Every structure is written in C-alpha cells, then in structure tokens.
Image: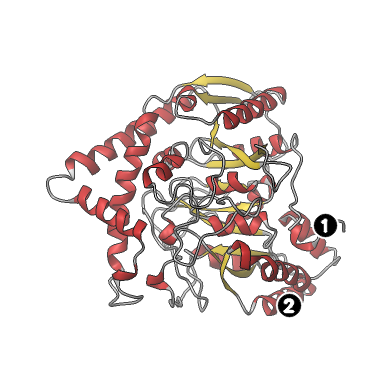
C-alpha cells in the first residue's frame, strides 16, 4: 500500500485487515510508533494504553474466527473525559490526575464491543473548558500543521492525534464547538451529533443540557461508520433518544442535487475574518455547482447566542463541578485551574438568589427563541452552512490572557448546542502563507441540520469532499 498504515482511513483499514494485507497488531504498532515519535512535541496524548498491542493481537485471533465486529482491530484515541475501566481518566485536570475509573463509559463499551483498540487518552482543555487546548493542567496541545499555533479546543488532543496520524479515529465532546472548531483548525472531519443521539453516561459532565458526544475522522464516510457504532438509546442515560438506530452510510452517495442549503445573513456581520469569508464563499459555490440550491435565510436571535450560552454553560458547570470536593475521590479544590475557577464563580453568581431570574432564567428563554429560529429556517431549507470560527487558528499564547477574546471564537458554534441540532465540520482548504508551511493553515465550514438529520449532513459533506484534495500530513 502507498500510505503508511497509520495514515489509513477507517474504511481502508477495515478493508486491509479483512483482506489480510496487514494485521491489527501491525496497524496498532504503526500508530504507537507515531505517538512515541511525535507526542513529546505535540502533546496530544496524556495516557497510553499499555495493553493496546495485546488487544490488537486478540483482535487478529477473532478475525481468524470470522468475527464481524465493524471496527475489529481499529486503533482509536479517546478524549480524557471518557471513563475507561482500569485506565487513568483525568479530565486534563490535576483534581483527577490519579483517578482510575471502575467502569467504562457507554460509548467506550460500544467501541470495545465493535472491536476497536483503545490507544490511550488524549489531552484537552481541563474539564473541556476552552477553545484552544491551552487550558490543560498537563500543558498545551500543539497544532501538527504548524506547532506554533493552537489546534483548537477543547478536544485539542483528539484533533491533533488525527492530524498527525497517531490514530485512525478519535473521540471528542462538543458543548459549544469543542469538536467542530478543532476539526476546522486541523483539517479533519468533526461531528457534533444531535443532543441525545449518543449516550453521555460515563463521560465527565461539563454542561449537561449542552454536551454532545461526537468524534474526529479523516473522512465523512469514516464519521458515518463511527456513528453507526456509538449512536442509540442507553438505559443509563435518560436523555438518549428512543428512535430506531439508522444506517448512516445509506444515502452517502446521493449527492446534493436539489438540496436547499441556507446561508444565515447574520453570520457575515459578526467580525468574520476576510480569508475565512473568501474560503466559505468558495465552498458555497462548489456546492451550488454540484446542484445544491443556495438560499439566504435569517436567524434573528443569533446576536444573543454567545451571551446566552456562557450564562447557561457557566451555571451548569458550577453545579457539575460541585461534586469534586476532594472527599469522595480526586484531589481538593485548590487544584482547579484559573478557567474552572472563573466559570464556577460566574455560574454560582447567575444561579444565586436574586439573580437567577435576571440571568439563568432569561438565558433559557432566549435559548427557546434560538431553537424556534432554527425550526422556522428548516421549513425553508434542508440544511444550513456556516463558518466554524471567525478567525484562522491563532498562535499559542496569543489569547490565553484575554478570556473574552477566547470566548468570541465560539460565536458560530454555540448556537447548534443551544438548539440541540447536529453539526458536521468539513475541511475546506488552507488559508494564509506561513514560513513553515507552503499551504497555510487549515480551515473548514460546518453543516447544520434539523434534529436527527446526520444522514443528510454526511450526504452533503461527502459530496463536497469529492471536490477537495485530501490531505495526508507527512509527520
């Protein structure tokens, strides 16, 4: 094969394993070697599963016994918010730096049952609080495309592991853009599913009404393969859907002809960087050439989304972090980092007597209006296309001392979490001209759809991908 094994997609790796062109042990070793070589610089992984190779060998034995598990022998990375039995789970915080869970998250159990090999746990902003990967208590993650720049956050390590070919797929969490934004910054595909499509059980809670459990892959098709494994009802999570599980690969090749795609006029009046605007306009033209109908729409309450989000998210964070008191497990509260403390203080204030009605209750009312905006929009269009971030990736340290500037990077992504709808981030090229890269920095756009419209998002994303040159980074 022309590609190194660790550069393969899920689809190609599964095919190669079935045809016995290589073994799962060889595939896993290729990923572990890549981690050993590049993780000291990139800091994508916090913990390596020392049993990964043994598990890969067992997967090879199962294949010899005609196992049909869909991800049999595929090495994946897990964001360190996922409980993993016997494998350290830190939430990238010193509060949990020594914590060893006694059970697996539901998604981890599903992945293991599907035959996946867990390579280890990836770095991220502590407690998933951040948009750059710099808030981790274990040091920042660097962007493999250019190590002077951030990879986005909070799921920084998972995105970086994919962009540097350390894993075949990687998990993440998305509360306000924490999968879609780092995917856009690292030229990978990132999915935030519909709220409730994938179980949150066993995953460290950030903001319970906003958290969505998604993943990073190298292609849209791979994202559909992965979601086929992780989606569905879970008796341990009452917020999961009772809808019948779909096959997300079914309509992948249908194309976009006749599909109405909305472009929100408000999204172009929010400090959008000129290079990002040019890139997304080019992407929209490509979809139009493929047969999509582009329609200008309005989401009138967009301007209130960021303020609404940060009130709700801080309130729920302050409630969820109250359990970390240093008595039952973990270290004491003096180990919380600055960003966690900032959000605890803000959330406690907005929930306090005399201020609840003025802040939290009002934010929840605005959230209802935002959801209605999308309901109305989806009466006119099938899906919506928008930027992911108002700016390209920024340099490490550039915004770390300016929380407000950092929060503004979420302006296009939080609205999907407030509405509970799915979003798919798709790479759309490179912008700028950097000394260390003749291709500039990666960028992408997001496709948003009605609740449980992931099949449609994959259909649009896959069609667009066929117009793009796929990347394989050399590291």
In this view, the residue farthest toward the left is: 354
> Which residue is label 2 attached to?
57
Is residue 301 left or right of 453 when viewed as pictured?
Answer: left
- Which residue corresponds to the image point at 66% horizontal and 26% vertical from the top-left? 282
Q: Quadrant of residue 71?
A: bottom right
Find residue 404 and report its horizontal and vertical position in percent. 37, 43
- Which residue corresponds to the image point at 30% horizontal and 59% vertical from the top-left? 341
Q: Is the Cβ of the residue at disc 2 closer than 8 Å to that at disc 1?
A: no
Find residue 384 and report its horizontal and vertical position in percent. 54, 30
Is residue 444 left or right of 199 when viewed as pictured?
Answer: right
| Number of numbered tags placed on the structure image | 2
In the drawing, what numbered circle is on residue 3? Answer: 1
CA separation, marks 2 and 1?
22 Å
Q: Secondary structure at mark 1?
A: loop
Residues 248 and 362: in front is 362
Residue 229 visible:
no
Is residue 405 positioned above or below 74 on the image?
A: above
Q: Earlier in the sequence, mark 2 or mark 1?
A: 1
Q: Quadrant of residue 301?
A: top left
Residue 41 visible:
yes
Residues 213 and 80: in front is 80
Question: Which quarter of the rendering shows the C terminus?
Answer: bottom right
In the drawing, what numbered circle is on residue 189? Answer: none
Residues 97 and 450: in front is 97
Q: Nearer the viewer, mark 2 or mark 1?
A: 1
Is residue 159 positioned above or below 432 on the image?
A: below
Question: Which quarter of the rendering shows the N terminus?
Answer: bottom right
- Which residue corresponds to the image point at 70% horizontal and 77% vertical from the top-left? 53
- Which residue corresponds to the image point at 30% horizontal and 77% vertical from the top-left? 328
Q: Secondary structure at mark 2?
A: helix
């Amino acid at each position: 094969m022309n590609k190194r094994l660790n550069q393969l997609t899920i689809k190609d790796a599964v095919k190669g394993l079935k045809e016995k062109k290589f073994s799962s042990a060889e595939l896993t070793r290729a990923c572990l070697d890549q981690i050993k070589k590049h993780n000291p610089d990139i800091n994508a992984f916090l913990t390596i599963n020392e049993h990964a190779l043994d598990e890969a060998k067992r997967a090879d034995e199962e294949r010899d016994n005609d196992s049909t598990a869909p991800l049999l022998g595929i090495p994946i990375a897990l964001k360190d918010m996922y409980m993993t039995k016997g494998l350290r789970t830190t939430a990238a915080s010193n509060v949990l730096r020594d914590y060893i869970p006694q059970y697996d998250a539901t998604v981890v159990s599903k992945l293991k049952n599907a035959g996946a090999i867990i390579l280890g746990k990836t770095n991220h902003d502590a407690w998933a609080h951040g948009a750059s990967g710099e808030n981790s208590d274990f040091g920042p993650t660097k962007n493999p495309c250019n190590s002077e720049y951030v990879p986005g956050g909070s799921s920084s390590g998972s995105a970086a592991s994919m962009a540097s070919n350390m894993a075949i797929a990687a998990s993440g969490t998305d509360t306000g853009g924490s999968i879609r934004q780092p995917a856009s910054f690292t030229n990978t595909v990132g999915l935030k599913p519909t709220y409730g499509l994938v179980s949150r059980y066993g995953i460290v809670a950030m903001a319970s009404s906003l958290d969505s459990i998604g993943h990073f892959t190298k292609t849209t098709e791979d994202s559909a393969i992965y979601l086929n494994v992780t989606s569905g009802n879970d008796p341990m999570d009452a917020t999961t859907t009772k809808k019948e599980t779909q096959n997300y690969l079914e309509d992948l090749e249908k194309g976009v002809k006749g599909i109405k795609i909305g472009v929100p006029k408000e999204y172009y009046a929010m400090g959008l960087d000129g290079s990002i605007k040019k890139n997304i306009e080019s992407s929209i033209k490509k979809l139009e050439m493929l047969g999509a109908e582009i329609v200008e729409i309005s989401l009138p309450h967009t301007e209130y989304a960021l303020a609404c989000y940060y009130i709700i998210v801080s309130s729920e964070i302050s409630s969820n972090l109250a359990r970390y008191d240093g008595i039952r497990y973990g270290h004491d509260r003096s180990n919380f980092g600055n960003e966690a403390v900032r959000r605890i203080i803000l959330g406690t204030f907005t929930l306090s007597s005399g201020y609840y009605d003025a802040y939290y209750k009002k934010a929840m009312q605005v959230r209802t209006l935002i959801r209605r905006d999308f309901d109305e929009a989806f009466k006119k269009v099938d899906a919506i296309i928008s930027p992911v971030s108002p700016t390209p990736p920024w340099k490490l340290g550039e915004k770390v001392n300016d929380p407000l500037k950092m929060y503004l990077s979420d302006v296009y992504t939080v609205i999907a979490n407030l509405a509970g709808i799915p979003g798919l981030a798709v790479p759309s090229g490179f912008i700028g001209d950097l000394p260390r890269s003749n291709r500039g920095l990666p960028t992408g756009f997001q496709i948003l759809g009605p609740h449980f419209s992931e099949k449609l998002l994959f259909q649009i994303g896959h069609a667009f991908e066929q117009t793009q040159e796929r990347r394989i980074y050399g590291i």
